[in-house]
Amino acid sequence: MAHTPNLAGEDRLDALASRYVDVAALPWKPTPTPGIDMKVLLEDQDTGLLTALFRWQPGTALDLHEHVEIEQTYVLEGSIVDDEGEVRAGDYVWRPKGNQHLARSPGGALVLSFFLKPNKFVGGKLAGQELK
């Protein structure tokens, strides 16, 4: 079932009620990649659906990974770079199922990303399983 971890009062809401999220009140959580933290806005562990803010420290690199389904990212601050190009603050990128890349953020970034399924890292680990 879809939910927002650490959302105050979510357990008292009707199943069909809207969820208003105070993003500033959500905790930043470390990811398995040093230098990248996240705030989970929406997740459904049964399907792999994930919407999250990711905060990249300057110089951070995310290992080679494959997008198992479409991934979408909107950059709020800074930029993310890979061999195909750079997406900067105010811009958006989406990657098709099967796309593989190594992402870097030379100057740091704050991004909003949407995943239909967890990424698969070349080593065989699933990002969704590691990020919880």
Image (cartoon, rainbow, N blue to C red):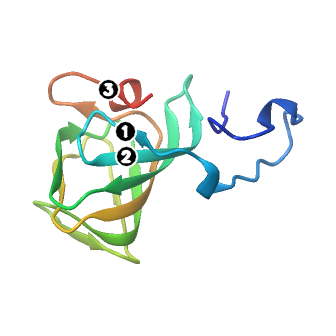
Disc 3 element: loop
Instruction: Identify the residue shown where x is 67% and y is 35%.
Output: 3
Total marks drawn? 3
- Disc number lying in front (3 or 1): 1
Residue that badge 3 annotates:
126
**Residues at circles 2 and 1 in contact by the CB criterion of under 8 Å:** yes
Instruction: Identify the residue shown where x is 20% and y is 69%.
Output: 107
Disc 1 element: strand
Name the image quarter holding the C terminus: top left
Residue 129 as seen in the image, left or right of residue 47: left
Residue that badge 2 annotates:
37
Instruction: Identify the residue shown where x is 81% and y is 38%.
Output: 9
Instruction: Identify the residue shown where x is 15% and y is 65%.
Output: 106
The three-letter code of the residue at mark 3 reads: Leu
Residue that badge 1 annotates:
30
Placement of 57 over or under 121, stated as above or below: below
Disc 3 and disc 2: Cα gap in Å?
Answer: 17 Å
Among the two numbered marks 3 and 1 on one chain, the one whose residue lies closer to the N terminus: 1
Placement of 132 over or under 21, stated as above or below: above
